[in-house]
Amino acid sequence: MLSLAPVETGNTEHHGTEHHGFSPPFDLREHTALVTGAGRGIGRATAHLLARCGAAVVVNDVCPDDAEKTAFEVAELGSTSLAAPGDVSTAGDVDRVRETVAAAGLDIDLLVNNAGVSTYRPILDCTEQDWDRHVDVMAKGTFLMIRAFAPGMVARRFGRIVNLGSYVAQRNCTTRNFGPYCAAKFAVVGLTEVAAQELAPHITVNAVGPGDVATEMMEREWQEEGTLRGIDPAAVKQSYRERLLLGDFEHPADVAGAIAFLCSSLASHITGSHFIISGGLPHTLAATQSQLN
Ligand SMILES: NC(=O)c1ccc[n+]([C@@H]2O[C@H](COP(=O)([O-])OP(=O)(O)OC[C@H]3O[C@@H](n4cnc5c(N)ncnc54)[C@H](O)[C@@H]3O)[C@@H](O)[C@H]2O)c1
């Protein structure tokens, strides 16, 4: 377990650091978080923000080096941190994550199920492996992590679980070419609603639904879409930017902010929700669609 004095991390989050007047929006000093898929992107930004709010943070990722790197950054921010690498889609790895956390003497009371994968591909071209990979990492992974860590929360009569949904996991969404992804995210939202029922009243369970966040995941999707449609990926990216009501992609730290809020005492009466953080999507898509009709 790492626990070092705060130093500058040089990370790119636009909310800044303690050294640039950052004041934590929430007080999470009494808490210990576990963030899955926190080696990069939204998960990494979430690990940083929860640490800045004072939480100890356990960093999971399927890539051990990335988990270690984020755990080191958390320690640099002054929080207790622990890397617990593993594949959330397999029960054996999730057991090992639970054992690593227990061996460090940590009790998880904030669980962020963020690990995810995506492929831009029409349903008719998707393989069985495409389907299994999306559903296993996101839906099954969220289930396995809740099953591993919610019992401790129940025993201690406190817990906050935040799952990564997506703006695509809503009714009337007009997205295409993300069949398995969309199905997996609807499953995550459904699981969120059922878990909120079963784990009440001491544990809240919510989902956050990002729109377009310019992480490695989206950059790869724009490449895939450009290749499939025979157009420049930069033009694809620009077209995604132009459809946003707020004019630009949200930053990983914007999603992290919503997650930290749902972990905070301010959100103690919110459960079973799917909180969309999308810069206005899919309202702009609906508007574009109605102009075309
Ligand atoms: N980027 C977006 O626009 C967007 C939009 C909606 C929802 N989301 C969701 O937000 C979450 C994070 O997305 P991101 O954009 O940061 O993605 P990303 O690809 O940048 O990061 C995902 C992380 O998850 C890890 N991971 C993948 N499979 C794993 C597994 N089996 N076990 C443990 N870790 C695993 C990866 O190694 C990576 O570090 C995902 O659930 C994604 O579906 C993202």
Image (cartoon, grey):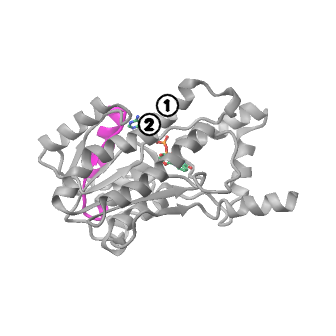
Crowding around mark 1 (Cα neighbors within 10 Å: few <14, some 14 to 19, many 20+) is many
- Residue 285 can be seen in this image: yes
Residue in the image at 60% along x and 51% along y: 168
The magenta segment = 52-75
Give the secondary structure at mark 1: helix
Q: Which residue is mark 2?
A: 137
- Front residue of 267/246: it is 267
Up-down: is 265 above or below 196? Answer: below
**Magenta residue check for 193:** no
The quadrant holding residue 234 is top right
Q: Is mark 1 within 8 Å of ligand 1?
A: no
Callout 1 amino acid: Arg
Q: Position of residue 28 (x, y in %)?
A: 26, 66
Image side of residue 87 versus residue 33, left or right: right
Q: Position of residue 166 (x, y in %)?
A: 54, 52
Q: Which residue is mark 1?
A: 133
Callout 2 amino acid: Val
**Magenta residue check for 58:** yes
Q: Quadrant of the C terminus?
A: bottom right
Q: Is mark 2 within 8 Å of ligand 1?
A: yes
Are discs 2 and 1 less than 8 Å apart at CB? yes
- Residue 80 can be seen in this image: no
Up-down: is 257 above or below 141? Answer: below
